[in-house]
Structures are given as structure tokens and as C-alpha cells.
Amino acid sequence: MDFSVIGDKIKELRRIQRITQKELAEDICTQAQISKLENGEVIPCASTLFLISQKLGIDVNYFFNIGLTPRLDYVEEVARQLKIARRNFRYREMEEIVEMEERNPLFYQNQKYLQLLIWHKGICLHHVHSDFERSLQTLDEALELTNEKFRTEQEMEILLSKGIVFFENNMLDEAIQIYESVYTEMKNLPQLRDYILKTKLLYNMARAFTRKGLYEKSTEVCIEGIEWSIEKDNLFLLGELHYHIGYNFELSEDYRSAQDYMNKALLIFDLQKDQKYSDYINGKLMKWQEENIIKNT
């Protein structure tokens, strides 16, 4: 670990916030120790780094990560671009990023970031190349890189991707088994930092239960996802969860309830300025009205 990089970053953050060395040192250590730390002359203890991070308003893990990966800013930007591509289903763009960064030695300095690349390579093998076997092998390869006693959130994301590969190949029991194992491990986490991870898990569980014909169980999972999203003030997948409940009611031939939830989904999508599902849902509701399955509202 390069502790001089940590010192440089502390100095940079301190100056951005216009905090003097004396102010930063208060109730933590001496001003002289802060000076030595910023100059890379001493190795800080974990408790000191934690207190400094609290005063600077950042996560202490940022210091450890930047010590392991000096160009952390670049690596995190790549991670951000991969996340955007993943959420918007831009898999060819994702593949281009992975192929470019596979040659970048920065990603080989930290297993966590190498795992990030291999994980997204596995996603591309499925969504771009429809290579089921290699996709699963690559996702397993990514998981083997860290092999922690307790799953990290990134490992849970990889398992979720693996479940999606099974789901999209109609291997529903295998997908559900993975989703339920992640759900159990998630409950054992002392704190979930990425709230969206649980929402994604619940949504994908619901889809698998629906395809198995377990509509009530699927709806229960959707309701849990909605309650979780509201609790965390997060709209991610909120529209999709409402639509999926409506879809379950449609499959159960309860069209009045289906209409109710699909209208709620439309409202949420409208608030989010997300129109990609609106035409489809409106078309479905209009068809039901024309066939006198539901009344015009």
C-alpha cells in the first residue's frame, strides 16, 4: 500500500475544505503528526485515518482504496461508466470499455477492480454473444478472485447477474436458488450501502416467481420491494415493481387490480420522465377497454 498517496489526498481534501492542519488535528493527534502524514513520513493507524475521514466527511475506505490503487479516480470513473451502461442495457458499449481496460495495469493492482472487469465481461458474454457456458464460467471466475467469508456487495451483484443468466435461459429453479441465497446473505450484512441492490434482487426474484406461475408470491416480493424503496426514498425500479404486480393480476385475470397497478406504474414513469414502457402499457389498457375487459376511466 502506498501511504504517501493517502497523505497527498488528505492534504488535497483539507485544502479544498479550507481546514488548517491544526484544525484537522484537533481531538485526533498533533499538528506535527498531520504534517508528517501529509508528507508521507509516517504510516497512519486505522483509528487515526477513521477520525480524519469523519472530519473530512468521506468514507474511511476511500483512503485504503486509494492506497491500494493510486489512480483510484480513474478506476472509479470506469466503474461509473460500466454501471451506467449496465443500467441502460448498453452491453456493446460495456464490452468496448472492458476490452480497453483489460490492458490497463491499474486494474491488476487490486483484486476488487479486476473482479469488476471480469464480472462485466461475463455479462457481455451473455447479452452480446449469447454464450451461456462462458458467461457462467467468467462470472464464477470473478467470484473466485475475492472468496471472502462473507459476501461483499459487489459479489452479491455478480451472483445477481448469474441468476439473470439462468433466468433468461429459463433455468428458473437455479435462478431462484441464487436469488434466495443472496437475500439470506444480504440480511446478514451489518449495513447495506447500496440500497438499489436489494431493490434489484427483489424485482428479479419476483420475475422468476411469476414465470414459475407463483403469482401471489411474486406480488409479495414486489410489495416488499416497493416498501423498501419508499423507506429509502429511492425511485429506482419503483415503476417496474408496480407494473409487475399489475402483470401478476393480469395473469390471474383480475383486470381491475391489474389496471390499478399499471396506472400507478404509468404515473411513476411519467414523474421520472421515463417513457420507454408508457406506449406498451397504454396500448394494453386501451385494448382491454376496447374488448370491454375493463371500463374506461
Image (cartoon, rainbow, N blue to C red):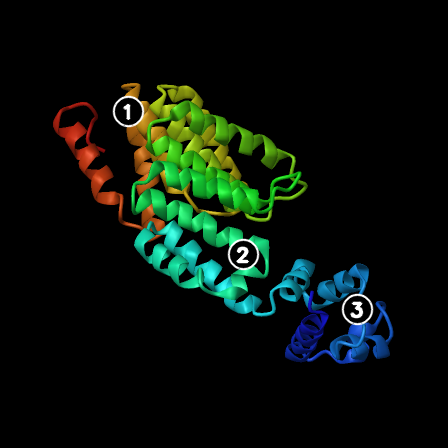
Is 203 on the left-hand or right-hand side of 145?
left
Residue 190 in view, yes or no:
yes
In the rendered view, would you say 95 is above or below 69? above
CB of mark 3 within 8 Å of CB of mark 2?
no
The circle on residue 113 is 2
Type of amino acid at the residue the image marks with label 1:
Glu
Name which residue type carries label 3: Ile
> In the drawing, does residue 20 fall left or right of residue 204?
right
- Comparing 113 with 48, the one in front is 113
Residue at figure coordinates x 36%, y 25% from the top left: 210
Instruction: Identify which residue is drawn at 15% across, 24% down.
Output: 292
SS for callout 3: loop
- How far apart are the two marked residues, 3 and 2, measured between alpha carbons? 24 Å
Q: Residue 250 carries which label?
A: 1
Residue 268 visible in this rendered orientation of the protein: no
Identify residue for label 3. 43
- Measured as percent of width and height from the top left, residue 204 is found at 42, 34
Q: Position of residue 154 (x, y in %)?
A: 54, 47
Query: Crowding near pointer 3: few (<14 within 10 Å), some, many (20+)?
Result: few
| Disc 2 crowd, CA 10 A, few/some/many (<14, 14-19, 20+) | some
| Residue under the point 52% across and 65% down | 105
Splitting the image into 4 quarters, where does residue 170 fall?
Answer: top left
